[in-house]
Image (cartoon, rainbow, N blue to C red):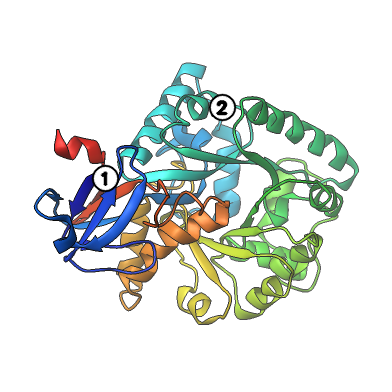
Amino acid sequence: MIKITADDIFDGRKFHGPDRALVLDEHATVSALVPRSWVGEDFVKVDGILCPGFINTHCHLELSHMKGSVPEGTGLPAFLTAVMENRTPPAADVLHSAIDAAAEAMRQEGTVAVGDIANTAATVSVKRRTAHQTEWHTFVECMGVADAFAPQRLEHSMAVLAQFRQAQLPAALVPHAPYSVSPTLFRLINGLKSNGTISIHNQESAAENELFRHKTGPFLQFYRHFNMDASSIGGTASNSLPAFIPYFDQGQTMLLVHNTFTNRQDVEAALAREGETYWCLCPNANLYIEGMLPDVDMLLEMPGVTITLGTDSLASNHQLSIWREIETLRGKFPHIPLETMLQWATLNGAMALGIDDRFGSFEKGKTPGVVQITGNTSRILDPKSLFA
């Protein structure tokens, strides 16, 4: 058995203090979390905090080659324009090299499972190759603003989805965002069977709510720039969340991502729907694009809100580190306990991806991975190496 102690141990829900020992078997499966006195002297003491592996519930690994290529503070419509116009890499090897490096950096910093967005099959190879180290759940995005072309857009995304499933990688087809999915396309996605968790970008900018409330604002210029017929989108006299959430009436688990401009009435509209709802925060990307953060205090006050964490992409972030996201939130919301944020990053994320039977907490029989947090750094631990 492998026995580890630390300055503190967080189990996925709470801290246990320095007088506990984490006991793992030779396969890194959790056996117990017990008083230190129970394990005798045959243990290893490490500095800092031990916690279960991080769950990144929102990432765009396929944009890893775009690091530093989009200016900060442009606002979402301009950011999207830059990504769409510059996302093609100069060569395939540049793209795959960037993807590989980003995936490995995430793992080294403690991420053991990822809800990753895909518009193409570019990440299939790295996910298949590293599936023994990282649990990948791919959300294949479907988008299309013209109602008339909804069936074709769905067919295109289903072809991408098939490539992940053929590689035996967990994957679901999901809508990109309220401003990029027509009503007919929303209905088609809702009708898919056995599709798993539905991830969607939600209220990342004030422009999104303006589009839905008044059919005005920067998104109209965005559509004109790309010659898109988006006449079926917006003008609902409500914010975007109450406008799109009724499309999902099959009891699906929903993962709402960003929520930067979400208010109480929006939250109430989402919680009134049947099915679990999770709220993913990507604070560093929100600051990078809009210079704003979600109203985290409001979310915490709302009964039934369960928060997770994500990193977004290297086009909108300087790294893909969940610990860096926690550090940013701690700087802006110092009154929120670290214990609470670590649960967002571990057990809550595992629940959102439907993998909490194996990940997210130090419970007997799970293989959640072990992260060591010291100062302002986090790293994945190989328990066996501690005894080498």
Location of residue 61 in the rendering, given as x and y in whole percent from the top left corner:
49, 37
Type of residue at label 2?
Val
Q: Which residue is mark 1?
A: 379
Helix, strand or loop at disc 2? helix
Q: Which residue is mark 2?
A: 124
Type of residue at label 1?
Arg
Depth check, front residue: 54 or 224: 54
Q: Judge from the rendering whether residue 342 lies leftward or rightward of residue 237; answer left or right.
A: left
| Above/below status of 229 relative to 64 | below
At 63% from the left and 62% from the top, the residue drawn is: 207
> Which residue of the protein is positioned furthest toward the left in this rendering?
41
At 54% from the left and 48% from the top, the residue drawn is: 79
At 24% from the left and 41% from the top, the residue drawn is: 383
Location of residue 114 in the rendering, given as x and y in whole percent from the top left corner:
49, 44
> How far apart, in angstroms, are the residues tagged by discs 2 and 1?
25 Å
Q: Quadrant of the C terminus?
A: top left
Depth check, front residue: 74 or 125: 125
Q: Quadrant of the N terminus?
A: top left
| Above/below status of 1 relative to 266 | above
Depth check, front residue: 160 or 219: 160
In this rendering, does residue 338 appear at all? Answer: yes
Q: Judge from the rendering whether residue 116 lies leftward or rightward of residue 50; answer left or right.
A: right
Q: Judge from the rendering whether residue 213 lies leftward or rightward of residue 308; answer left or right.
A: right
Helix, strand or loop at disc 1? strand
Crowding at mark 1 (Cα within 10 Å: few <14, some 14-19, many 20+): many
At 20% from the left and 51% from the top, the residue drawn is: 4
Crowding at mark 2 (Cα within 10 Å: few <14, some 14-19, many 20+): many
Which label belongs to residue 200? none
Location of residue 229 in the rendering, given as x and y in whole percent from the top left corner:
82, 46
Instruction: Of the two numbered discs 2 and 1 on the same chain, state the one appearing first in sequence.
Output: 2
